[in-house]
Image: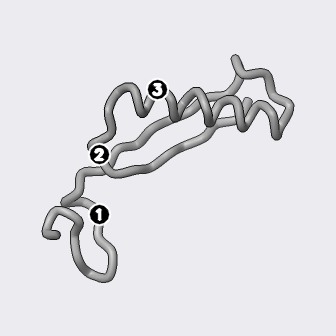
Amino acid sequence: MPYVTVKMLEGRTEEQKRDLCEKVTKAVSETTGAPEENVVVFIEEMSKNHYAVAGKRFSDQ
């Protein structure tokens, strides 16, 4: 049973997250041979004030 974790900044719509889950599930199923019903997708949304690149938080930009 494949488990996939997607970490991304908050702000996507429910429709975007739904589409992401569907497409990730299909891609994992096609590449691993696992049935789609066995693919688990986790979405971890991060607040922009909890994520920084080069010392700059996204919430400060």
Sequence-earlier tag: 1 or 2? 2
Residue underneath mark 1: 51
| Residue 45 to residue 15: above or below | below
Q: In the depicted view, which residue is nearer to us: 4 or 14?
A: 14
| Position of 49 relative to 13 (above/below) | below
Neighbourhood count class around disc 2 (C-alpha, 10 Å): few under 14, some 14–19, many 20 upward: few
Give the secondary structure at mark 3: helix
What residue is at 19 percent from the left and 60 percent from the top? 49
Q: Quadrant of residue 29?
A: top right
Tell me the residue that label 3 is attached to.
18
Question: Could you tell me residue 11's position as x and y percent?
Answer: 27, 43
In the rendered image, residue 57, in percent from the top left (x then y), is placed at 22, 70
Q: Is residue 32 left or right of residue 48?
A: right
**Do the CB atoms of the residues marked 1 and 2 lie less than 8 Å apart?**
no
Q: Is residue 27 above or below residue 39?
A: below
Q: Name the mark on residue 9.
A: none
**Residue at the extreme top:** 37
The x, y position of residue 34, in whole percent, is 81, 28
Decide: few, some or many residues near mark 3? Use Cα within 10 Å; few <14, some 14-19, many ≥20. few
Camera-near label (1 vs 2) is 2
Circle nearer the N terminus (3, 2): 2
Quadrant of the image containing the N terminus: top right
Kindly report the distance in space between the C-alpha atoms of the residues bearing marks 1 and 3.
Answer: 23 Å
Q: Quadrant of the C terminus?
A: bottom left
Whichever of callouts 1 and 3 sits on the residue coming sooner in the sequence is 3
For label 2, the residue is: 10
Residue situated furthest bottom in the rendering? 54
Amino acid type of the residue tagged 1 in the rendering? Tyr
Q: Measuring 52% from the left and 35% from the top, which residue is drawn there?
A: 20
From the viewer's perspective, tell me whether residue 56 is left or right of residue 12. Answer: left
